[in-house]
Amino acid sequence: MTSMSFLEAISFIGYAVEVVGVAIILLGMGDASLRYIRRNMRSKHADLYQNFRREMGRAMLVGLEFLVAGDIIRTVVVVDTITDVASLGLVVVIRTVLVFTIHLEVEGHWPWQNPQQGD
């Protein structure tokens, strides 16, 4: 067996964290969908869709946090060229913007605001 170098190990950890993020998103979407179907069969309340969106958004938020963490891990240790840094940086920025906008959609306020403040 060959031993893994430090950079390979960190790269593997970064990808593993990203896989966890994808799994969280997929499992969260499945769970939210199943709950929505079950609730919809029992009652037809108007807030069922809002609950579904909130649960989906929360799963995406947590999953995106893991994806950003994986990108950061790989960027800090593994990146070789300025092009790699720029492309991974752009991915992190896009994912971070998604996290903020999904948080606003799910919670109704920006992450730095108190829930009572609203806008």
Image: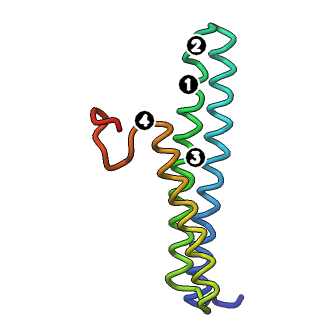
| Nearest to viewer (mark 3 / mark 1) | 1
Q: Amino acid at mark 1?
A: Gln
Q: Which residue corresponds to mark 3? A: 60
* Mark 4 to mark 1 CA distance (whole Å): 12 Å
- Looking at the image, do the residues carrying marks 3 and 1 touch, with CB atoms under 8 Å apart? no
Q: Residue drawn at (57%, 88%), measured in percent from left and top? A: 7
* Mark 2 to mark 1 CA distance (whole Å): 8 Å
Q: Which residue corresponds to mark 4? A: 108
* Mark 3 to mark 4 CA distance (whole Å): 16 Å
Q: Amino acid at mark 3?
A: Met
Q: Which residue corresponds to mark 1? A: 50
**Nearest to N terminus: mark 2 or mark 3:** 2
Q: Which numbered marker is on residue 10? A: none
Res. 94 image quadrant: bottom right
**Nearest to N terminus: mark 3 or mark 1:** 1
Task: Return the residue nearer the eye: 114 or 57.
Answer: 114
**Image spot of residue 70 (x, y percent):** 55, 68
Q: What element does badge 1 sit on?
A: helix
In the rendered view, does 2 fall on the left or right side of 73?
Answer: right
Q: Residue drawn at (52%, 85%), measured in percent from left and top? A: 77
Quadrant location of the N terminus in the rendered image: bottom right
**Image spot of residue 84 (x, y percent):** 63, 84
* Mark 2 to mark 3 CA distance (whole Å): 23 Å
Task: Return the residue nearer the eye: 113 or 51.
Answer: 113
Q: Which residue corresponds to mark 2? A: 46
Q: What element does badge 3 sit on?
A: helix
